[in-house]
Amino acid sequence: MAGVKLIIQIINLSPGTVFKKYSDDYKIYREVYQPHLIGLELRDIPEQLAETIQKIVLREKEICYKNNSADKKTTNLFIPGSLWNIKEISRKILSVGDEDLGYRIANVIKNYEEYESGSYNIGSRVFKFDRSYVMGILNVTPDSFSDGGLYLTSGEAIKHGLQMLDDGADILDIGGESTRPGAEITAESKEIERVIPVIKGILKERPEAVISVDTTKKKVASEALQLGAKIINDISALTSEPEMINVIKKNNASVVLMHMKGKPKDMQKNPFYDDVVKEIYDFLYEKSLLAAKAGIKNIFIDPGIGFGKRLEDNFELIRRLEDFKSLGFPILIGVSRKSFIGKTLDLDVNERDAATVSAETVAVKNGAKVIRTHNVKYGVQVCKLLNNLC
């Protein structure tokens, strides 16, 4: 198994559309379908190992489907069943198959099964993920798609940030660079000039506040963390400036790793995916593994709604958010006032709060542990209600 890229994912097959997709990919008989069915997919597994695993599964009187990759050098395996069935298969693989693969499957099952039981210590707060939290958006920019220019001065931004905390925000996410579709890159010095006074002002009034900084630049991150920010929200998932990982580690900070296809300037120019959930899962697997190996303890993953996604991609990601649980990290999602809502309902950006609540409700129900939102009052209501209902 050394040097093998193999990626493992647990997929919820209960929705009919998802079962149909996998039945088409693997030629699964319709009779296999039942409520609460899940599937274990092993992607890019070496052919010889795939044959061994398939024999083990069949000996256990379970079903294992095979789908060769395009280059025919590796294979994808798919095992449908209950969580109990898949746990038993992982134990058998561990004992008579490939020990490393058995441990990896067991770890993925553990991630999925214990998704609700984790917790992070961030600053003076303990975030327990048997419930969901609200991250308030504070853009100190002239051109962000929703609130650009509203809080451009430090005083206005500080006042709004304090109000969001009063409204119940668990985290404030401060950004000094617009990442709307078509946005140009902001100079590092300008970004620092925008966000640093706001961080100082908020922490002066509320030293206990958990501050996140929305940036891809290591110098911005370094200055913000030294002032007391606790989270770096990197929309490039550490790819824009790879040295960012060292800044986060040095400051013992948390990180949000988001998927984006392209850059803000060009990300909405004909984005395309063969399988949006699978491709984003694989990307976040790679980046979260990199961060974890570097010693970063608190990692959030974000599928990046609206960042290089088509309308249908955004809906598919929200519907299938549960399929990211087996990565083992709490899911953060931002749907607030985004264009997929406006295009679907023909609403101006300032008319999208009610629809945002609907999308956030579905996202939390499907596994989101942090919702990044403009309207903190509504976000708090969503989380409070679902934390009590679910």
Image (tube, grey):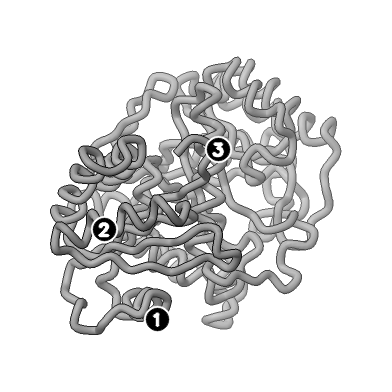
First in sequence: mark 1 vs mark 3: 1
Q: Is residue 150 visible?
A: yes
- Looking at the picture, how far across and down is residue 182, in whole percent? 79, 62
Q: Mark 2 highlights which residue?
A: 55
First in sequence: mark 2 vs mark 3: 2
The quadrant of the image that shows the N terminus is top left
- The residue that appears at 79% across and 58% down in the rendered structure is 265
In the depicted view, which residue is nearer to us: 247 or 92?
Answer: 92
- The residue that appears at 73% across and 40% down in the rendered structure is 240
* Cα separation between marks 1 and 2: 22 Å
- Looking at the picture, how far across and down is residue 154, in whole percent? 70, 34
Q: Which mark is residue 24?
A: 1
* Cα separation between marks 2 and 3: 58 Å
Residue 39 lies in quadrant: bottom left
Task: Tell me the element at label 3.
Answer: helix
- Looking at the picture, how far across and down is residue 90, in whole percent? 23, 46
| 117 left or right of 84 in image | right
Q: Mark 3 highlights which residue?
A: 161
| 96 left or right of 272 in image | left
Q: Is residue 263 above or below residue 65?
A: above
Hey, what amino acid is under mark 1?
A: Asp
* Labelled pair 1, 2 in contact (Cβ < 8 Å): no
* Cα separation between marks 1 and 3: 49 Å
Hey, what amino acid is under mark 2?
A: Lys
- Looking at the picture, how far across and down is residue 15, in whole percent? 29, 74
The quadrant of the image that shows the C terminus is bottom left
Q: Is residue 130 visible?
A: no
